Each structure stands twice: as C-alpha cells, then as structure tokens.
Image (cartoon, grey):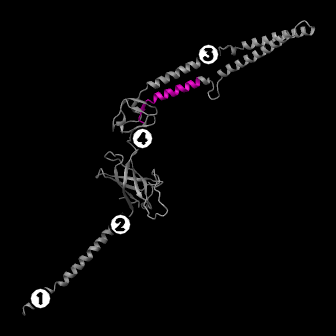
Amino acid sequence: MADAEPQTAETAAPAPRRRWGRIAVMLAVPLALAGGAAIYWHSLQGKVETDNAYVKQDKVSVSSLVGGTIVDVLVKENQTVQQGQLLFRIDPQPYEIDLAQANAQIATAQADITALSNDAALSGADISSAREEIAFAQSRLERQKALWDRGFTTKADLDAAEHAVAQAREQLRAAEARQTEARAKLANGAAVPGQNPRVAAAQAQKAAARLDLSRTEIRAPMAGLVGQADRLQPGQQVLANLPVLTLVGVHGTYIEANFKETDLADMKVGQRAEVTFDAYPGIRLKGHVASIGAGTNSEFSLLPAQNASANWVKVTQRVPVRIELDEKSPRDLIAGLSVDVTVFTDGKKR
C-alpha cells in the first residue's frame, strides 16, 4: 500500500499541463479566425469586385433599304468581312425597270418643252392677228355709226359691227392668255433655277430609282464577324428595314461590369482594373474604368421596377461601369462571355 501512494502522485502531476494545453488550443482557434478575417478584410480594402460582368462588342443589325427577293448570298456564318464588302444581292430587275421609266419621263418632259417652245402662242402671231381684227372691226363700226347718223344703214348692221369689235377684243384676250400659259410652262422655278420643273421632277425620280437600284447590293457597314446568316437564303423575300443578319465588330471590345451602388463611393474614371475570364482561366488582362453609367440597370430597362410607397424592402441597385482593356487578349474575346472585374479604387498598383 505504501508503494501505491507515490505512483498516484506521479500520475496526478501532468494534469495542469494538459489543462493549459487545452486552453491554448481553445484560444488559438478564435485568434486564428480573427487574424484570418483581419487579413481578408485588409485584402479587400482599396478595391471592389464583381462577377456580374460581361464582354461587350459593337454590333450592327444589317437590313436592306429596299424590298425584294434574294438572288445571291456571298457570306456565311462566322465569316470575317471588311467594311464595304458585298454581303448579298436583291433582285435588281424591278428597280432597273423603274430607272428606265424615269428616263422615259425625262425624255417626255424634254419633248414637251420643245413643242411648247415652237407653239404659236409664244410667237405672238395670234395676238397680232387679234389686234388687226380689232382695228378692222373698229373701223367698220365707225363707218356703220356714220351711216346710221345719216340714216343709210340699219340697226342690225350697226349691232353686228359692235359685236364684231367685242369678239375681236375677246380673241385678243384669249391669245394673250394662251401666251401667258405657254410662258408659264416654260418658266424655271426658284427652287431649281435654270431648269424646267417638269424636267427637274423627272430627273429627281430618276435619281430615286438609281438609288434604289444601288441599294439592291447590301454591303458591310463595318468590319466584323457575320452572325445569324442562316436567315439568308436565295429566293427568300426580304422586307425593307427588317434586319436579316448581324455584324459583330472585331474592334472596340470592352467590358460592362454591373457594380452594386454601394461599391461606387470611391470609384472614379481612370482607375486601374483587372479582368479575368470564366472561359479562359489563365488569362488576366489589365484595363481601366472608362465611364460610369448615368443610371442603374433597372432605370433603363424596358419595364422599370415600380416599388409601392409602402414597400420598405430596399433592393441594392446595379450600375453599369464600362471597362476598357489596356492590352490585347491572346484569345479571341466572344461577346457575352462572363468575366470577373476588380477595380483598384486606392490607385495602387498590384
């Protein structure tokens, strides 16, 4: 029994050390968590991040300004085209006929002008003849009046002489009116000086017909990649101003990052940004803040959100921020790709 007491004392001695060890472990865990949180919080200072960002590229919907049937397609899906390159053609025959009709109208107007220029009404012959008739009828009337005063003529002859004078004067007025009308048809308007209005109208119609004919060839308004070209098929009817394909620009790629409104306090135009891509994990591109949106996404949406006055649930809004890339990507950037954007609001380089 005497040997058992020292053994019990020896086994009881290490107990305080184990207790302090447990206390140290219990303190180390929250301290480590607090330290990690502090480090993480410090790492977030001076920058804001968002994964609500996408690659944007200039896009143009290509349509025909005239309607008709497609007769030739010269591009295919995802083909790269240059500005001014021919994309497809519309049947030009109806517009060639319109141009021929316009030429015929010009020729008709010119022929009418030539005929009017040779019209007797312009020469003044009718007016001279009418004046001579007036003079003859007036002299006859004077003779009839002299005879009437001496009683050698009848009332009927005197009335006939007066009627002849009136008719001659009416013929003079008609001749003068015809001359005025002929001159008006040959006159040049102030809007088109030096040119007959009828000829000018026919030439304007010809210009419109020629313009429509030129629009049967649809060309690329800018360089880019052809999209949605499957809608282009020979024989398909095209309506004017209805988009038939899309061109995605090969230049002008940028990032549209939708930041929370609470992230904009320190954000300014020109601050450095960094962009990573979900599609290309190994690519990290540098950029800068080019502009900050003038309104939130909901403000410019087709159907803006309408919150009732009694709705006290506050929704954090998103503001579009345009990020311009400062370096060329080693991979082709496709419009709509998801990206992560970090903007360094403290101005420090990392």
Q: Position of residue 143 (x, y in %)?
A: 87, 8
Q: Nearer the viewer, mark 2 or mark 4?
A: 4
- The front one of 68 and 1 is 68
Instruction: Report which residue position mark 4 lands on.
Output: 60
Q: Quadrant of residue 270?
A: bottom left
Determine the CA span between mark 3 and mark 4.
51 Å
- Give the SS element for disc 1: helix
Q: Residue at x 42, y 54 (%)?
A: 321
Instruction: Report which residue position mark 3 lands on.
Output: 114
- The front one of 25 and 214 is 214
Contact flag, marks 3 and 4 (Cβ < 8 Å): no
Q: Which residues are magenta?
A: 199-220
- From the viewer's perspective, tell me whether residue 213 is left or right of residue 116: left
Q: Amino acid at mark 2?
A: His
Task: Categorize mark 1 by other alpha carbons within 10 Å: few (<14), some (14-19), many (20+).
Answer: few
Q: Which callout, 2 or 3, points at the residue further toward the start of the chain?
A: 2
Quarter of the image for the N terminus: give it.
bottom left
Q: Position of residue 13 (x, y in %)?
A: 16, 86
**Which numbered dot is residue 42?**
2
Q: Residue at x 37, y 51 (%)?
A: 54
Instruction: Report which residue position mark 1 lands on.
Output: 8
- Give the SS element for disc 2: helix
Q: Which callout, 1 or 4, points at the residue further toward the start of the chain?
A: 1
Q: Amino acid at mark 4?
A: Val
The reply to whether the magenta stretch includes residue 211 is yes
**Which numbered dot is residue 268?**
none
Determine the CA span between mark 1 and mark 2.
53 Å
Q: Nearer the viewer, mark 2 or mark 3?
A: 3
Determine the CA span between mark 3 and mark 1.
141 Å
Quarter of the image for the C terminus: give it.
bottom left
- Residue extending furthest top? 152
